Each structure stands twice: as structure tokens, then as C-alpha cells.
């Protein structure tokens, strides 16, 4: 006999009370990455081989700096969630799983911090 309410069945919340939260976050960042990475690719193509001063001047534009920060944030969030799912699915030793999940988060934070620092340094110094 199933004691769950119809609302509980629709929400799909399991014992961890997370439900499909990771699934939707992964899809949301994937959709956000499409226009952001298109902008990034065009930016890289436009300034490939350009003098350093031109690139610094372009990144000093507030719009470009904000979009680049959004690219970093969205891409790293997407990467972290994807790696978390892989680790949870394929690493079966509990200790190793916890260590890898922590390293995954720390890696994303470290790379994100370094990238955002570089963007901000160029944006405000240029």
C-alpha cells in the first residue's frame, strides 16, 4: 500500500528530499551556456592574434566583463553538477565518493575564483 499523497508522487521527492533538483540545475546551466559560450567563441575568434592592449581594452568593457564572468560561473556550475552525478553513479566506496565530491567542489571554486579574479583585474585595471 502506497502512503504517498498525489502531490508527493508528482514532486518525486525521494528519501534525500532532493528529487530532480540536480537534473533541472544541469538543464538550466546547459541552456544558459548556449548563448554565453556563443559569445565566448565569437570573442575568442575576434581577438585571436590581436595585440594584448586590444584584448585588455575589450575586457575592460563592463558588458564584456560581466558576460565573461557569467560564462565562467555557468560553465563551472554545469561542470561541477555533471561530475557530481558521475561520481555518485560510478564510485561505490563511500569514503572515496565523499573525498571526490569534496575535491570536485573545491576544484570548481578554485578555478572559478582564479578566473573571476583575472577578469576583474583586467576589467578594473584596463
Image (spheres, rainbow, N blue to C red):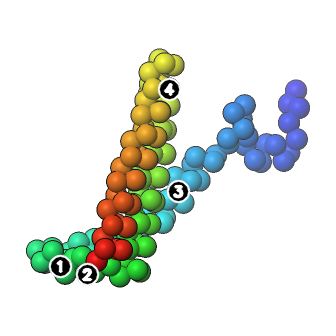
- Secondary-structure class at tag 4: helix
Would residue 35 be seen by someone viewing this image from the given angle? Answer: no
What residue is drawn where x is 84% and y is 47%?
7
Question: Which sits in the foreground, 100 or 120?
Answer: 120
| Residue bearing the label numbered 2 | 57
Q: Quadrant of residue 3?
A: top right
| Residue bearing the label numbered 1 | 53
Instruction: Check contact, mark 1 vs mark 4: CB within 8 A.
Output: no
Asked if residue 78 is positioned above or below residue 99 in the image, the reply reads: below
* Foreground label between 1 and 4: 1
- Secondary-structure class at tag 3: helix
Q: Quadrant of residue 33?
A: bottom left
What residue is drawn where x is 44% and y is 21%?
96
| Residue bearing the label numbered 3 | 27
* Foreground label between 4 and 2: 2
In the rendered image, residue 17, in percent from the top left (x then y), is placed at 72, 38
- Secondary-structure class at tag 2: helix
From the viewer's perspective, tell me whether residue 68 is left or right of residue 57. right
Q: Gap between marks 1 and 4, in whole Å?
A: 45 Å
- Secondary-structure class at tag 1: helix
Q: Earlier in the sequence, mark 3 or mark 1?
A: 3
Question: Which sits in the foreground, 121 or 5?
Answer: 121
In the picture as drawn, the residue positioned furthest to the front comes out as 125
The label on residue 109 is none
In the rendered image, residue 115, in percent from the top left (x then y), is placed at 34, 58
Instruction: Check contact, mark 2 vs mark 1: CB within 8 A.
Output: yes
| Residue bearing the label numbered 4 | 98
Q: Earlier in the sequence, mark 4 or mark 2?
A: 2
Q: Earlier in the sequence, mark 3 or mark 4?
A: 3
Mark 3 surroundings: few (<14), some (14-19) or many (≥20) residues within 10 A: few
Q: Gap between marks 4 and 2, in whole Å?
A: 43 Å
Amino acid at each position: 500500500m502506497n502512503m504517498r499523497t498525489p502531490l508527493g508522487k508528482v514532486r518525486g521527492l525521494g528519501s534525500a528530499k532532493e528529487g530532480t533538483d540536480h537534473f533541472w540545475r544541469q538543464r538550466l546551466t546547459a541552456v544558459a551556456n548556449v548563448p554565453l559560450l556563443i559569445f565566448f567563441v565569437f570573442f575568442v575568434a575576434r581577438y585571436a592574434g590581436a595585440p594584448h592592449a586590444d584584448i585588455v581594452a575589450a575586457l575592460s568593457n563592463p558588458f564584456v566583463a560581466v558576460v565573461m564572468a557569467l560564462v565562467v560561473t555557468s560553465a563551472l556550475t554545469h561542470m561541477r553538477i555533471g561530475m557530481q552525478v558521475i561520481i555518485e553513479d560510478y564510485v561505490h566506496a563511500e569514503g572515496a565518493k565523499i573525498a571526490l565530491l569534496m575535491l570536485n567542489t573545491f576544484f570548481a571554486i578554485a578555478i572559478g575564483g582564479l578566473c573571476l579574479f583575472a577578469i576583474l583585474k583586467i576589467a578594473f585595471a584596463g
